C-alpha cells in the first residue's frame, strides 16, 4: 500500500481545480470503480459513436448546462476523461481494505493527460455537476474518453483473434522471470540495460512532482507486462471507419477551441533538461493529439527499446454487435495504438477546423460536429472532411516538419513529468523523426479503413424515423437475442433525430423498457439481470390486446397533439417459443389492430417456422413472417437480422389525419394542416399514406409540399401507388414506366392530388397506399452552410420543407365505413327498404 499512500501524498501536494488531473481516481468517477453494477462494463451502454453522440446530446439538452461547443469540449475532458487508470492487485498477504480503491491513474497515458488538463487546455473552475447525466452514462462516457490499457488475464484469451504478432514477439523475448506464484511477468532488467545503450537508468528524484514506482516489484509494471495475450484498450469507440480513441478527438477539438501556444518552460517547471535546441512553445492542438502520442512513443520506446520505434498496434472488438471491449493484438509498444492514431488525426483535423472558425453560424453543437464528421456523406460542411477521408485529410492538414518540431518540443516537456526507465541523453532528433516517419508510413499503409466510395455504396441514402416496438420472448438466451436487438437499433438509428424503441414482454405485453430515443438509455436498462427477471412464456392473447389498447391510446394522443405525420411504427415479435397457439380472440385482436391502427406494420421473427399459425395475423404474409436462427455466441447476427431490418426500412413515414384517432368516424376530416420536415443534402425521405385516410372520394383531397427557408440544391417529389420507395430515374423491376411520377420543386410547391385514389376498389384492404418521396439533389461540389439551425435539424445544412394535407378523411374497414361511400349508402338504403 506504500505506493498508494505516496500517490495520495502527491495528490494533496499538487491540489488543483482539475480533479481528473490528480493522481487518484477523481471522486465523481469513483463509483465507476466501486459499484459492481458499473464495474461490469456489460451493464454500461456499448462504446459506439452513436452512443457517445447520444450522451453528448443529453448533456447539451440539459437545461442546467448552458455551454457552446467550445466550452463543452473542454468541460467534457475535465469532467469525464481521466487517462491511465489501472487496477492494482493488492499483495496477496494483504486483505483488501474498504478504505482503498484498488485503482489509480498509473499508466503512462496519465502523465500527458495531466499536463494537458493543467497547463495546455486548462478548464474553468467548475466541472459539470455530478447529476448532469446518470451514473451509467457517466461511467460509459468516462470509459469512452479515457485511454488506458488493462493487461489483466481475463480467461477468455482464447478468443483473441490474430495473435500471430504476439506469438512472434513472445518467442523472440527471453524467458521472463517470475515474480511470484501468480505468474506475473516483470521486465528483465539485465536485458533492458544491455539493450538500452543510449540511456542510463534514472533514479527517483523526490523533487519531481510525479509518483515514481521503483523498477522491479512495481505494480504498474505488472499492468504493463501482465500476461493477457490481448490486453484491453479503454477509450476506444467503435465507428464504421475504425475504432477511434474518442478522448483524443474531444481533446483535439478542445485544443482548437481554446487554442494557445504554451511555452515549454511552463510545462517543465524549470527542470534542468538539456533541450535547448527545440522550439520553445507547443500548440494546444498538436499536444492534445499527434505530438502528445508521438512524445510518449519516443520517450518510452526510446528509453526501453533503443532505436526501434514502433507506431501502431492493431486490435479488434470481441463482439460484432454492441461492442464494449477492444482487444489489442500486442502487449508491447502500446503508446500509439491504431485507435489513438485515428483519434489523433480526427482530433487534429477537427481542432484545426474549429480554430479556423469552420462554424460561421456560431450555433454548431459538439454533437453535430461529430455527427457530420463520422457520417457516410456530406461531412463537416464539405464532403472531403469526413472520417472516410482520414488518410487524405492527414496529408492535407499535417505538415511533416511542423509535426517533427512540435513533437521534439513536447518530448522535452513530457520528459520532466513522466517516470521513465532511462534517460535519453542524445539522439532525440533521430528518435522523433523516426517516430514521425513510422507514423506516416503506418497511416498510409496499415490503416485500411472503409473508403468514402464504399461508405456511400454500403449505406442507405435515407434515414429512418420509426417507432419500433419489440415484443420479446424471455425464452431467448440473452447472449443470442441482445446482439440481434442491438443490430436492429443501430440499423434504424435510434436517436434524438431518428427512431425510438420500446421493449415489451411477450408474456403479457407489459413494458420492459419504455419508449426511448436514447440508445444509451435502452442499453443501460436492458441488461442481463433485467432479462433474467422477465416472466417466461408467450401469451399472444394478453399481449395483442394490451398492445392494441396502448396503440389506440397513442392515436388518441396524436389527435390531441394535432399530429400530422413524420414517424412510422413497426411491431416486431421476436419469438423463441415453438407451437404458438392461435385462437379466435387473437385473430380478432389482430384484425382490430389492423383496422384501427392502419399504419402499424406487424412483423414476426421466430426461431422455428410457424408460418401456418401466424399468417393471418399480418398484412403481408409473404414478407412479414421470418424464421431466424440466433446463436449464443452472438455471431452471424448481421446475416440473420438483415432481412428483418430491410423489411422495417420499407415502412414509410406516416402522413395521417390525426382527427380520426382510433375510432375513424367518417365526418372527422382533416381540413388543412401541415408539419415541417427536413432532409439531409443528397438524402431522400419516404412517406406512406394509408387508404384509411382517402378511401372515399373527395375531389379536393391533396398533399402539398413546399420548401421553407433557404438551403442548397433542389428537391424532387415523387409519387407512386405500387413502388414503396419511389425515386426519379430508377425503374423497379416489374413496375411499369408510369408507376412513378416525379416533379422538381423549384419554388412554390408541388401538389399531389388524391382524387379518386381508391376508384375501382370495393374494400379498403384492396386499395393500395399512396407512396410519396422527397429527395434532395445536390452536386458533389456544392458547398454546404448552416441554414437549418433550429432544434429539429440533425445537421445544420439540412433542407427544410413543409408537408401540408387538405381534406383527408377517416375510413375504417370496421363496419360500414370499411366500404366505399356508395357501397355504404347502398347498404343503408337496402336496410331501410327491408324495414318497410
Ligand atoms: C455522484 O452521484 C452519485 C450518484 O448520485 C453518487 O453516488 C456519488 O457519490 C456522487 N459523487 C460525488 C463526488 O458527489
Ligand atoms: C468480451 O470480453 C469481455 C471481457 O472479458 C466479456 O465480459 C464479454 O463477455 C466478451 N464478449 C463476447 C461477446 O465475447
Ligand atoms: C417522431 O420522431 C421524432 C424524432 O425523430 C420525435 O421527436 C417525435 O416525438 C416522434 N413523434 C412521435 C409521435 O412518435
Ligand atoms: C430505465 O431504468 C430507470 C431506472 O430503473 C428508469 O427510471 C427509466 O425510466 C428506465 N427507462 C426506460 C426507457 O424504461
Ligand atoms: C412509460 O412512459 C409513459 C409516458 O412517459 C408513462 O406514462 C408510463 O408510466 C411509463 N411506463 C413504464 C412502465 O415506465
Ligand atoms: C389487414 O388489412 C390488410 C389490408 O389493409 C388485409 O390485406 C389483411 O388481411 C388484414 N390482416 C388482418 C390480420 O386482418
Image: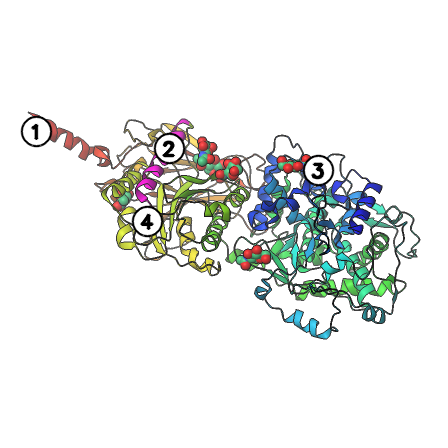
Residue labelled 4 has its Cβ within 8 Å of some atom of ligand 6: no
Secondary structure found at label 4? loop
Residue 14, can we see it?
Answer: no
Judging by the rendered image, the residue that carries numbered circle 2 is 555
Classed neighbour count for the residue bearing mark 4: other residues with Cα under 10 Å, few (<14), some (14–19), many (≥20)? some
Q: Relative to residue 45, is residue 663 drawn left or right?
A: left
Given residues 70 and 517, the one toward you in this image is 517
Which region is colored magenta?
A: 538-560
Distance from label 1 to label 4 (Cα)? Answer: 41 Å
Residue drawn at (82%, 48%) of the image: 6
Secondary structure found at label 2? helix
* Image vertical order of residue 542 relative to residue 388, above or below: above
Judging by the rendered image, the residue that carries numbered circle 1 is 834
Secondary structure found at label 1? helix
Label drawn at residue 71: 3
Q: Relative to residue 25, is residue 816 drawn left or right?
A: left
Amino acid at each position: 500500500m506504500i505506493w498508494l499512500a505516496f500517490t495520495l501524498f502527491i495528490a494533496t501536494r499538487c491540489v488543483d481545480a482539475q480533479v481528473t488531473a490528480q493522481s487518484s481516481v477523481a471522486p465523481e468517477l469513483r463509483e465507476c470503480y466501486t459499484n459492481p453494477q458499473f464495474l461490469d462494463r456489460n451493464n454500461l451502454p456499448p462504446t459506439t459513436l452513436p452512443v457517445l453522440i447520444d450522451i453528448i446530446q443529453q448533456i447539451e439538452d440539459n437545461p442546467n448546462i448552458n455551454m457552446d461547443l467550445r466550452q463543452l469540449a473542454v468541460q467534457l475532458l475535465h469532467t469525464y476523461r481521466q487517462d491511465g487508470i489501472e487496477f492494482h492487485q493488492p499483495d496477496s498477504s494483504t486483505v483488501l481494505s474498504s478504505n482503498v480503491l484498488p485503482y489509480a491513474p498509473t499508466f503512462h497515458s496519465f502523465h500527458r493527460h495531466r499536463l494537458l488538463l493543467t497547463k495546455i487546455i486548462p478548464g474553468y473552475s467548475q466541472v459539470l455537476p455530478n447529476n448532469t447525466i446518470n451514473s451509467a452514462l457517466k461511467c460509459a462516457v468516462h470509459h469512452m474518453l479515457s485511454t488506458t490499457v488493462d493487461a489483466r488475464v481475463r480467461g477468455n484469451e482464447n478468443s483473441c483473434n490474430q495473435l500471430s504478432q504476439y506469438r512472434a514477439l513472445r518467442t523472440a523475448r527471453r524467458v521472463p522471470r517470475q515474480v511470484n506464484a501468480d505468474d506475473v511477468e516483470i521486465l528483465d532488467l539485465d536485458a533492458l540495460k544491455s539493450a538500452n545503450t543510449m540511456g542510463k537508468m534514472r533514479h527517483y528524484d523526490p523533487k519531481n512532482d510525479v509518483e515514481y514506482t521503483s523498477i522491479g516489484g512495481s505494480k504498474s509494471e505488472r499492468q504493463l507486462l501482465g500476461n493477457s495475450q490481448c490486453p484491453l484498450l479503454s477509450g476506444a469507440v467503435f465507428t464504421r471507419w475504425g475504432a477511434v480513441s474518442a478522448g483524443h478527438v474531444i481533446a483535439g477539438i478542445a485544443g482548437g477551441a481554446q487554442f494557445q501556444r504554451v511555452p515549454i518552460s511552463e510545462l517543465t517547471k524549470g527542470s534542468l533538461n538539456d533541450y535547448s535546441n527545440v522550439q520553445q512553445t507547443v500548440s494546444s492542438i498538436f499536444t492534445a493529439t499527434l505530438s502528445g502520442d508521438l512524445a510518449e512513443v519516443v520517450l518510452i520506446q526510446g528509453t526501453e527499446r533503443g532505436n526501434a520505434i514502433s507506431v501502431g498496434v492493431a486490435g479488434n472488438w470481441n463482439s460484432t454487435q454492441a461492442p464494449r471491449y477492444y482487444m489489442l493484438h500486442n502487449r508491447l509498444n502500446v503508446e500509439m495504438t491504431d485507435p489513438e492514431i485515428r483519434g489523433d488525426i480526427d482530433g487534429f483535423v477537427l481542432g484545426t477546423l474549429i480554430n479556423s472558425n469552420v462554424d460561421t453560424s456560431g450555433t454548431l453543437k459538439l454533437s453535430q460536429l461529430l455527427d457530420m464528421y463520422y457520417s457516410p456523406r456530406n461531412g463537416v460542411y464539405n464532403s472531403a472532411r469526413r472520417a472516410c477521408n482520414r488518410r487524405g485529410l492527414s496529408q492535407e492538414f499535417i505538415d511533416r516538419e511542423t509535426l517533427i518540431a512540435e513533437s521534439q518540443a513536447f518530448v522535452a516537456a513530457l520528459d520532466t513529468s513522466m517516470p521513465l526507465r532511462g534517460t535519453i541523453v542524445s539522439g532525440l532528433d533521430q528518435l522523433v523523426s523516426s517516430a514521425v516517419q513510422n507514423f506516416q508510413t503506418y497511416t498510409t499503409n496499415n490503416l485500411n479503413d472503409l473508403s468514402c466510395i464504399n461508405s456511400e455504396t454500403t449505406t442507405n441514402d435515407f434515414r429512418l424515423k420509426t417507432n419500433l416496438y419489440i415484443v420479446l420472448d424471455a425464452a431467448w438466451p440473452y447472449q443470442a437475442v441482445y446482439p440481434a436487438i442491438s443490430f436492429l437499433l443501430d440499423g434504424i438509428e435510434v436517436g434524438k433525430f431518428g427512431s425510438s424503441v420500446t421493449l415489451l414482454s411477450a408474456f403479457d405485453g407489459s413494458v420492459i423498457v419504455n419508449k426511448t430515443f436514447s440508445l444509451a438509455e435502452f442499453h443501460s436498462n436492458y441488461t442481463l439481470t433485467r432479462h433474467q427477471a422477465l416472466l417466461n412464456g408467450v401469451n399472444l392473447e394478453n399481449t395483442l390486446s394490451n398492445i392494441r389498447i396502448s396503440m389506440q391510446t397513442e392515436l388518441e394522443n396524436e389527435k390531441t397533439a394535432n399530429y400530422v405525420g413524420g414517424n412510422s411504427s413497426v411491431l416486431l415479435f421476436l419469438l423463441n417459443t415453438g407451437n404458438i397457439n392461435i385462437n379466435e380472440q387473437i385473430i380478432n385482436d389482430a384484425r382490430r389492430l389492423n383496422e384501427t391502427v392502419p399504419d402499424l406494420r406487424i412483423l414476426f421473427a421466430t426461431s422455428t417456422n410457424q408460418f401456418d399459425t401466424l399468417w393471418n395475423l399480418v398484412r403481408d404474409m409473404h414478407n412479414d413472417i421470418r424464421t431466424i436462427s440466433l446463436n449464443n455466441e452472438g455471431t452471424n447476427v448481421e446475416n440473420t437480422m438483415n432481412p428483418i431490418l430491410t423489411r422495417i426500412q420499407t415502412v414509410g413515414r406516416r402522413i395521417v389525419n390525426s382527427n380520426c384517432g382510433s375510432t375513424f368516424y367518417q365526418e372527422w376530416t382533416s381540413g388543412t394542416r401541415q408539419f415541417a420536415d427536413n432532409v439531409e443534402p443528397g438524402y431522400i425521405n419516404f412517406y406512406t399514406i394509408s387508404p384509411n385516410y382517402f378511401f372515399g372520394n373527395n375531389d379536393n383531397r391533396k398533399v402539398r409540399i413546399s420548401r421553407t427557408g433557404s438551403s442548397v440544391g433542389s428537391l424532387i417529389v415523387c409519387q407512386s401507388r405500387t413502388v414503396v420507395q419511389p425515386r426519379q430515374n430508377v425503374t423497379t423491376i416489374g413496375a411499369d414506366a408510369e408507376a412513378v411520377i416525379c416533379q422538381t420543386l423549384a419554388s412554390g410547391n408541388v401538389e399531389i392530388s388524391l382524387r379518386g385514389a381508391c376508384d375501382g376498389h370495393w374494400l379498403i384492404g384492396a386499395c393500395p397506399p399512396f407512396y410519396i418521396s422527397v429527395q434532395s439533389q445536390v452536386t458533389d461540389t456544392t458547398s454546404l452552410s448552416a441554414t437549418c439551425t433550429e432544434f429539429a435539424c440533425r445537421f445544420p445544412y439540412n433542407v427544410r420543407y413543409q408537408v401540408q394535407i387538405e381534406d383527408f378523411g377517416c375510413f375504417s374497414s370496421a363496419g360500414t365505413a370499411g366500404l366505399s361511400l356508395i357501397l355504404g349508402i347502398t347498404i343503408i338504403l337496402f336496410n331501410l327498404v327491408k324495414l318497410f
